[in-house]
């Protein structure tokens, strides 16, 4: 500050000296040429205007006062004295002084404004160049500091620091500067833009749609009041662009995974079933062969029935996986739930050594509108879970009852109850409960698909909390009952 | 496995050698005369060389698809029974195969006895030519007099509306084979129909109420999901009930 003032003082003194010299010369010439007071005044005024084109206001004031003194001394009666007798002369000199000062002030103001607008234009050009450089950069999904490099050197920036709130990451570029990192972090925490002229730091919060997503700090920025804001906006735009890019890449990757998955599923559907058909046909033919004894025949039958079971399991897995990603297309017809489910329960009874599974029907008619295959699939998922998660040897019951215009199918089992924290999540896609670790492999799709089926059939599936005891888990699947038949 | 009374020749078309050989050996052991083809075009030339009673063909083959081969064979061999092999969850394949002229389909993985039953049913139907018969139709305890427009169930007359009668007679003339929705609608309502699924469902529901002992567990009119319906004659045991595959 001090040095700056001395420099300005010298400049003012220099202009004062030039101006004074000009006034002295003009006065000498005017005196020798015997010019009148009015002519001399105009010439002096001209000199003042010329002086104000390059000098500052203070020197103009000094030169104006000197000019008034010279005019008074050499051109106003009594000559060679600073005294003034006539009121008209006082008015003339005062007018000269005021006119001179006003013209000087206006010229200097105009000059300053021109200089400022030139500076703005330069800044705009540099910001524009910076924006172009940033746009030319490929978004870096890793969020690197590469994009900070173009900032350095622009508008005198010596160092720049970016605080990215999303990952709480700090990125630096430019000359090493103590305290920049800390100040940038603080700017984000306090949510305030700051200027420190003495140390040359300026910090700005980065905002997108009214939300603060980080902060940026500069060292050595020229005219921070004017340029820091636009620079922060450029940084915000770049950050947002990088984020959109990352988001789009993830979505593309997810879509690709999905298409791989469906390709694998379709391949499985065909690839598994052909060898299974071969085994089934061969085992069937073997069983028919006349040369077999009863034991060998039984073995051939076992191969056939187990291969058939493997086929059913494969079908079910593929179907479940398909239903997970596709819309359920039900084939709605009038079905009797208890007879549709009787086979399913039979199969579970045969294949489950640990549990006894029974079916209880509490209503006269259990006719519903539904897709028999989908109903079987949904109930199979519930029975699977009941067998997996219940206590060995405990009974699993499938209870069918009528509730208003719905048929409710409840699957009751005893075992570790579902923890309250998991109750809201068990129907989520790919969710597997804590108990899942104990019971072995699973896809986390069963309940998700079962509920999807129930909803597609116009019913619902939920955990029935009202009836269950402490160790009893009940799932309640409801399906709509047909409206009373209109007469044909 | 029930053996056929008459000799029956089968062309087995599949690109998977293991499955083809196994089916050949098993069908030969069951009394069929068998030949094989590895592709659709091989199958077409084989049928051109000599007539077969039946063609058993995989839908999914490299090169010419089974459906296309079926369409071409059907064009020059109208009396050959064609059974397509499909996989589950490929209902479109089934409908396409039936529309291309196939008589029936089996779904992988299948058991030998299911396969033989389907082959036998198609063989009998193509030979007996039920469709050509006029007069009296019978299935289980249902008896229909086409000329007089009357129908009895276990000797007792039942009353059907004219459309119901048309639909049931169409079913009974095509016993044991899958009928697509389009075929049923056009056969009963007329050639300009085809998309009116609701009509069909309503009439099937009403028919079941009148002819089935337990409409929720139909014995006669079986649903083939996404394809259509199949009329089953309960007194012919080798016409399989829609084979439930799911556990």
Image (cartoon, rainbow, N blue to C red):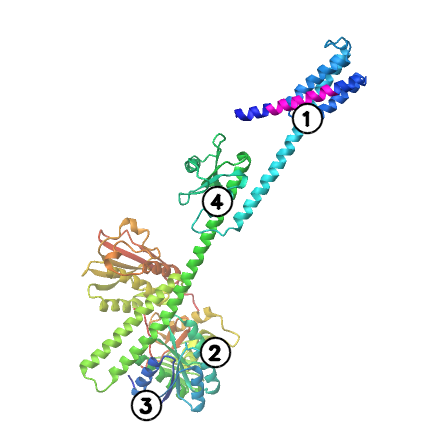
**Taken as a whole, is the magenta stretch helix, strand or loop?**
helix
Residue A432, by quadrant, is bottom left
At x 35%, y 73%, the residue is A271
Question: How far is mark 3 from mark 2, CA to CA?
Answer: 32 Å
Give the number of the disc on residue A52. 1
- Residue B28 shown left or right of residue A57 in the figure: left
Q: Say above or below: B87 vs A323.
A: below
Screen quadrant of the C terminus of chain A: bottom left
Q: Mark 2 or 1, which is nearer the eye?
A: 1
Q: Are marks 4 and 1 in contact (CB under 8 Å)?
A: no
Which chain letter goes with mark 2?
Answer: B
Q: Give the range drawn in magenta.
A: A10-25
Q: Position of residue A374 (x, y in %)?
A: 35, 65
The answer to if B46 sits in the magenta stretch is no
Mark 2, residues whose alpha carbon is within 10 Å: few (<14), some, or many (≥20)?
some
Q: Where is residue A314 in the image (x, y as percent from the top left)?
A: 32, 69
**What residue is shown with label 3?**
B5
At x 54%, y 37%, the residue is A227
Which chain letter goes with mark 4?
Answer: A
Mark 4, residues whose alpha carbon is within 10 Å: few (<14), some, or many (≥20)?
some
In front: B86, or A140? A140
**What residue is shown with label 2?**
B187
What kind of element bears circle 1?
helix
Question: How far is mark 3 from mark 4, CA to CA?
Answer: 88 Å
**What residue is shown with label 4?**
A148
Mark 1, residues whose alpha carbon is within 10 Å: few (<14), some, or many (≥20)?
many
């Amino acid at each position: 500050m001090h040095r700056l003032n001395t420099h300005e003082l010298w400049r003012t003194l220099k202009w004062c000296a030039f101006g004074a010299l000009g006034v002295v010369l003009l006065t000498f010439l005017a005196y020798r040429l015997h010019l009148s007071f009015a002519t001399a005044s105009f010439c002096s005024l001209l000199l003042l205007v010329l002086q104000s084109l390059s000098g500052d206001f203070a020197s103009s004031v000094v030169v104006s006062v000197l000019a008034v003194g010279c005019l008074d001394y050499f051109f106003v009666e009594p000559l060679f004295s600073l005294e003034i007798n006539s009121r008209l002369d006082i008015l003339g000199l005062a007018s000269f002084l005021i006119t001179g000062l006003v013209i000087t002030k206006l010229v200097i103001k105009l000059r300053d404004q021109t200089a400022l607008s030139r500076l703005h234009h330069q800044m705009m050009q540099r910001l524009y160049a910076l924006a172009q450089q940033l746009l030319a950069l490929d978004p870096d999904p890793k969020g690197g500091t590469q994009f900070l490099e173009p900032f350095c050197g622009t508008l005198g920036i010596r160092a720049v620091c970016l605080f990215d709130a999303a990952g709480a990451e700090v990125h630096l570029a430019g000359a090493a500067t103590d305290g920049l990192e800390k100040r940038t972090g603080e700017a984000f925490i306090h949510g305030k833009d700051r200027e420190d002229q003495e140390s040359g730091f300026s910090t700005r919060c980065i905002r997108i749609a009214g939300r603060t997503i980080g902060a940026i700090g500069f060292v050595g920025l020229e005219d921070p009041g004017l340029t820091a804001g636009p620079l922060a906006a450029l940084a915000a735009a770049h950050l947002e662009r990088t984020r959109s890019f990352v988001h789009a890449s993830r979505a593309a990757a997810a879509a690709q995974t999905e298409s791989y998955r469906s390709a694998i599923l379709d391949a499985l559907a065909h690839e598994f079933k052909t060898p299974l058909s071969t085994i089934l046909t061969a085992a069937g033919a073997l069983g028919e062969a006349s040369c077999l004894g009863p034991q060998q025949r039984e073995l051939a039958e076992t191969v056939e029935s187990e291969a058939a079971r493997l086929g059913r399991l494969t079908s079910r897995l593929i179907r479940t996986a398909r239903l997970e990603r596709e819309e359920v297309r039900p084939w709605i017809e009038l079905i009797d739930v208890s007879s549709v489910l009787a086979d399913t329960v039979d199969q579970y009874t045969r294949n489950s050594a640990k549990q006894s599974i029974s079916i209880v029907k509490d209503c006269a008619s259990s006719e519903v509108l539904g897709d028999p295959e989908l109903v079987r699939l949904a109930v199979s998922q519930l029975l699977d879970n009941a067998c997996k998660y219940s206590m060995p040897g405990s009974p699993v019951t499938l209870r069918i009852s009528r509730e208003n215009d719905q048929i409710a199918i409840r699957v009751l089992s005893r075992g570790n109850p579902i923890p309250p924290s998991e109750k809201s999540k068990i129907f989520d896609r790919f969710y597997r409960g804590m108990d899942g670790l104990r019971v072995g492999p699973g896809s986390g799709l069963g309940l998700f698909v079962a509920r999807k089926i129930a909803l597609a059939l116009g019913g619902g599936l939920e955990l029935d909390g009202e009836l269950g005891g402490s160790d009893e888990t009940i799932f309640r699947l409801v399906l709509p009952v047909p409206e009373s038949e209109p007469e044909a | 496995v029930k053996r056929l009374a008459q000799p029956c020749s089968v062309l087995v078309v599949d690109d998977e050698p293991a499955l083809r050989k196994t089916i050949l050996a098993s069908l030969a052991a069951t009394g069929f005369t068998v030949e094989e083809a590895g592709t659709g075009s091989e199958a077409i030339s084989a049928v051109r060389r000599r007539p077969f009673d039946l063609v058993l063909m995989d839908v999914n083959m490299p090169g010419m698809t089974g459906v296309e081969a079926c369409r071409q064979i059907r064009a020059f061999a109208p009396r050959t029974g064609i059974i397509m092999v499909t996989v589950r969850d490929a209902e479109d394949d089934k409908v396409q195969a039936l529309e291309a002229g196939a008589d029936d389909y089996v779904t992988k993985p299948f058991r030998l006895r299911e396969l033989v039953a389907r082959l036998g049913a198609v063989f009998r139907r193509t030979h007996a030519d039920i469709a050509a018969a006029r007069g009296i139709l019978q299935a289980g305890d249902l008896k229909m007099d086409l000329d007089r427009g009357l129908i009895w169930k276990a000797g007792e007359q039942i009353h059907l509306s004219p459309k119901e009668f048309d639909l049931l007679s169409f079913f009974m003339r095509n016993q044991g084979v899958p009928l697509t929705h389009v075929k049923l609608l056009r056969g009963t309502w007329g050639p300009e129909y085809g998309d009116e699924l609701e009509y069909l469902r309503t009439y099937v529901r009403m028919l079941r109420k009148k002819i089935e002992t337990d409409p929720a567990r139909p014995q006669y009119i079986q649903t083939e999901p996404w394809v259509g319906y199949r009329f089953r004659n309960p007194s012919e045991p080798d016409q399989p009930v829609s084979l439930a595959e799911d556990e």
